[in-house]
Image: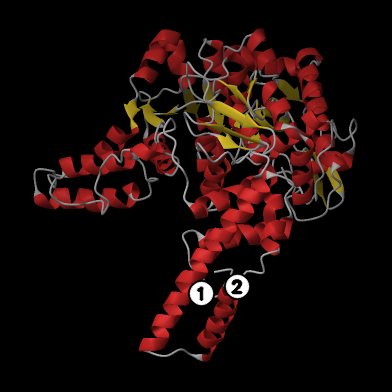
Amino acid sequence: MSGRIPKHFIDDLLTRVDIVDLIDSHVPLKKTGANYVARCPFHSEKTPSFSVNRNKQFFHCFGCGASGNAIGFLMDFSHLDFVEAVEDLATFAGVDVVREAVDFKGTTQKPENISDQYQLLEQVAAYYVKCLRTDEAGKKAVSYLKSRGVNDDCAKEFMLGYAPDEWQALANRFDQNQLIQAGLLIDKDGRAYDRFRGRVMYPIRDKRGRIVGFGGRVLDDSMPKYLNSPETPVFQKGKEVYGLFELLRKEAKPKRILIVEGYMDVIALAGSGIHYSVATLGTATSQAHLDLLFRFSSELVFCFDGDKAGRDAAWRAMESAFGALKDGRQVRIMLLPQNHDPDSLVREEGAEGFAERVQQSQPLSDYFFSTLASDLKLDEMEGRSQLINKAKPYLERLPLSVFRDMMFVRLNELTRSSLLDVSGNPARLNPKSIGNRPHERRLPSLPRLIIALLVQHPELISKVEQKEIIWDGLEFSGIQLFRDILAVVLRIKPANTAVLLEHYRNHPDEKIIKDLASLGLLTSGQNVEAEGVENEFSDALDRLLAQAREACLDGLLAKGKDNGLNQDEKELLRKLLVIKHSGAI
C-alpha cells in the first residue's frame, strides 16, 4: 500500500498500547513477579518460556528466541507485514492510521482515498456478481463456467462475476475519478471507458480478504485472453497471489501450498477438494511471493505443465526460490504429464490421484542437480568440472544455512571432489554455545550490563549526559555500539524499549538490541528491574569509564617514554591527569 506511515505516529502508537493487554487478547498471560508468562505461541512447549514485560513493552521467548515489541508480535502471530501490523495495532488502540500519502505515480493522494478504494472495489465485485447471476448477457459466462466444472458453491466462494460488454457499465454507476484510481476505468484523451468488458471476472483478494484488483477472461477468441488490473495504490501483482484468502479461510496453517499458473487451476482444484493451491497473477513467481507464502506453510510445491514452456517456468521459479530458502523451508517441483494442466489432470485422476502426485513431487535439491547434470557426462572429469561451474553460482546465492552447506556437500559427492572445498565455506553444523542455552544464567560483563540497562531504560541517557565524558582514547568492549545507541536515544528520545527497538527494525544491530533488551530476565544477582536501577547504572558506568581512562592513561605514559606524544595526545594526557588528581581515576 502506498503512503508512508510517519515515524512519530508509530512511536506514539507503541507508547499508547500496552503490550500486555495486546498479547493477552491473543495468548492468555499469567503474572509472575515483574513479568507475564505463557506457553510460547510460536513453538510447542510444555512449560512457559514466553515472557512479556510491561515496563519495557517487550516480549521474549527463551525457548525459540522470538522477541520484539507489539508490532513484531502481530507480524509473527498473525502473519502480517509491517504496514498491516501497524494497521491492526492502531485498530486495537482505537485510532486511525496517519499516512504521508503518495500514490504509485508519486503524486499526493488524500489518506482516506485508500479505504475508499477498498470500498469501491467491493461494490464493483458485487455488481459483477449480480451481472453474472441476473443479466441476460451473463448466461454466456455461466455456461462457460459450467463447462469448466465450476459449481454454484465454488462460484460463490471465489465471488466470480461478469463484466457486461459495455463501454460505460461502471462509469455510469460509480465515481469516475475513483474508478480511474482503482484501475477499473481507462481515461484516454478525456474519454473514460471500462477496462473490463464482456469478461468472466475473478476478484483478487489479499490475505485479509480485501479485494485489491480483478482478473478477467474473454468468452470468445479476442485478445488478450486474460487481463489483470494495473498496478494501483492497493494492488501490486508482484506481491499478491490468487486464492490465498480462500485457502487460509479453509486452513490457517496448511501443511503445504501448491503454486499453479492460473485462476481456473485454483478454482478447479478447490472444486475437487484440493483447497491448498494459489496462482501468481500473470507474472513469474517472485521472492516476495515466496516470502509471503512461507509465512503460512513451510512447504511450497511448484506445479507446471510438462511441456517446454512449463519446464522453463519451473527453472525460473527455482531460481527465485534460492533466495528464500532458509532452514526449515522446503520447495518441491511438480511437472505434469504432457497435454495436461491441473484442471484437466484432477478431472482425469481425481483428487486422490492428484494429491498423490503432489506428495511424490521432486525435492528442489534433486530437481536442481538432475536438471543441471542432464546433458553432462559425470563419469568424465570434464563433465564434473562443468557441473561445478554451473552449480556454484546458484548455491552461493543461498542464505547461510545448514541447507546451503548440505547442497555443497551434495555437489562434492556428485563431482567426486569430497577433498575439494568447493564452497569456500566447509559444510558443518555449528552447535550453539553451551553458555548460551536459555536455562543457564551467567553474569553479564560490565560493558554489556551498562548497554543493556540503557536499552531497557532509555531515560538513563540523562545520567550519561551528566558525566561529561571525554571519549578520545577511550576503549572498552562494545564502545562503538554504546556510542551508537547513545546517539539514537539522544536523537529520538524513546519513551520505552519498544520505541527504541522499532528504530532498529531491519538494522544490522537489531538482533543485538533484542538480546540486550532481554538480558535482565536471564541474569541472576543483577536484577535490572530493581528500584535502584539509576544508581546501578550510574555506578557501573563510573567504574567502566574509570577503567577505560586508566588504561588510556597508562598507554599514553608508556608511549611518551618510548616514542613521544603529538600535540593532541599531550592535551589528552593533560586532561586525564587532571581527572585522576580529582579522584575520578
Res 473 label: 1
Res 470 label: 2
Instruction: Examine the rendered structure and indicate whether residue 2 appears above or below residue 248.
Output: below
Task: Say whether residue 53 is visible.
Answer: yes
Distance between the alpha carbons at the discs numbered 1 and 2? 8 Å
Instruction: Examine the rendered structure and indicate whether residue 422 appears above or below residue 332.
Output: below
Res 488 label: none
Q: Nearer the viewer, residue 578 or 417?
A: 578
The image shows residue 209 at horizontal and vertical percentages of: 70, 25
Mark 1 and mark 2 residues within 8 Å of each other at the beta carbon: yes
Q: Residue at x 30, y 41 (%)?
A: 430
Q: Residues within 10 Å of mark 1 (few under 14, many from 20)?
A: some
Dividing the picture into quarters, in which one does residue 207 lie? top right
Instruction: Examine the rendered structure and indicate whether residue 424 appears above or below residue 111.
Output: below
Q: Residue furthest left?
A: 380
Q: Quadrant of the N terminus?
A: top right
Q: Residue at x 69, y 19 (%)?
A: 141
The image shows residue 368 at horizontal and vertical percentages of: 30, 38
Q: Residue at x 80, y 27 (%)?
A: 124
Exactly how many numbered labels are in the figure? 2
The image shows residue 389 at horizontal and vertical percentages of: 24, 53
Q: Nearer the viewer, residue 188 or 289?
A: 289
Task: Say whether residue 183 is visible.
Answer: no
Q: Amino acid under label 2?
A: Ile
Dividing the picture into quarters, in which one does residue 413 lie? top left
Q: Nearer the viewer, residue 23 or 3?
A: 23
Horizontal arrangement in the rendering, residue 557 relative to residue 55 (left or right):
left
Q: Quadrant of the C terminus?
A: bottom right
Q: Amino acid under label 1?
A: Gly
The image shows residue 10 at horizontal and vertical percentages of: 75, 44
Q: Nearer the viewer, residue 389 or 373?
A: 389
